[in-house]
Amino acid sequence: MKTNGTLPLRWLAVLLGSFAFCLLIHFPIHWIIMLKSFHPDGLKLFGFITLDPVTLEYLAYALFNPISLIMASAYIAPSKQFVTAVVMASLIAVFVTSHVINTPTLITAGFYLRVGLNVLGCLIALIAVYENQKKNLKCCITRLIRRFALPALRQCAELKKKIDFNKLRR
């Protein structure tokens, strides 16, 4: 494959675009949580767990950052969607693992919840990209069948009509 040195530039474009989209996602998440925090009942997770807005914002970022990063990278690089998604998920896994290793000894349940939400976000995004690519692959296969296989089958059927198989059996 001849790339003329454009492959690193493509990956740079994917990284910059997906990080920019990830930052754009922070704005609506922040404002939804801030507007919800002014509600008199407070922020309740699952209807009964009361959380302060900062904790809920961190948890939302932990879930939506991997999803937005992986989905944006797959959208920016449409020819190799799943490969790009796996590379970005691997990058996220490296960052989360280094964060777990380099964290001081004081680890709370919220820390494990954020790590788990990062992993869950990666899995959700990978499944979504895989399903989208599988659907596109199915459409591509049906187009190939319609274009090449069906005309070939029609030609075989026409040949079958022309050939008298009773004469060949004798």
Image (tube, rainbow, N blue to C red):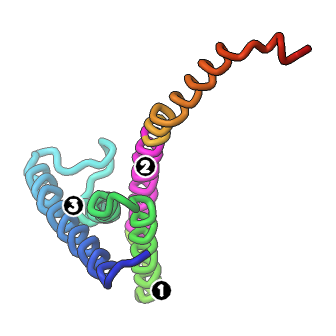
Q: Earlier in the sequence, mark 1 or mark 3?
A: 3
Q: Position of residue 160 (x, y in %)?
A: 67, 18
Residue 133: mark: 2
Q: Residue at x 39, y 59 (%)?
A: 81
Percent across and percent down for residue 129 are: 40, 53
Q: Nearer the viewer, mark 3 or mark 2?
A: 2
Q: Which amino acid, mark 1? A: Ile
Q: Which mark is nearer the camera, 2 or 1? A: 2
Q: Does the magenta stretch include residue 121?
A: yes
| Snapshot quadrant of residue 76 | bottom left
Residue behind mark 3? 52
- How far is disc 3 from disc 2 in space, using C-alphas? 39 Å
Residue at x 39%, y 70% (from the top left corner) = 88
| Coordinates of residue 74 in the picture (x, y in percent) | 34, 60
Image quadrant assignment for residue 95: bottom left
**Mark 1 Cα within 10 Å, few/some/many (few <14, many 20+)?**
few
- Residue appearing at x 14%, y 63% in the figure: 24
Q: Is residue 83 above or below residue 155?
A: below
Range shown magenta? 114-139
- Measuring from the top left, give residue 152's x and y in whole percent: 56, 31
Mark 1 vs mark 3, foreground winner is 1
Three-letter code, disc 2: Gln
- The residue located at (55%, 33%) in the rendering is 149
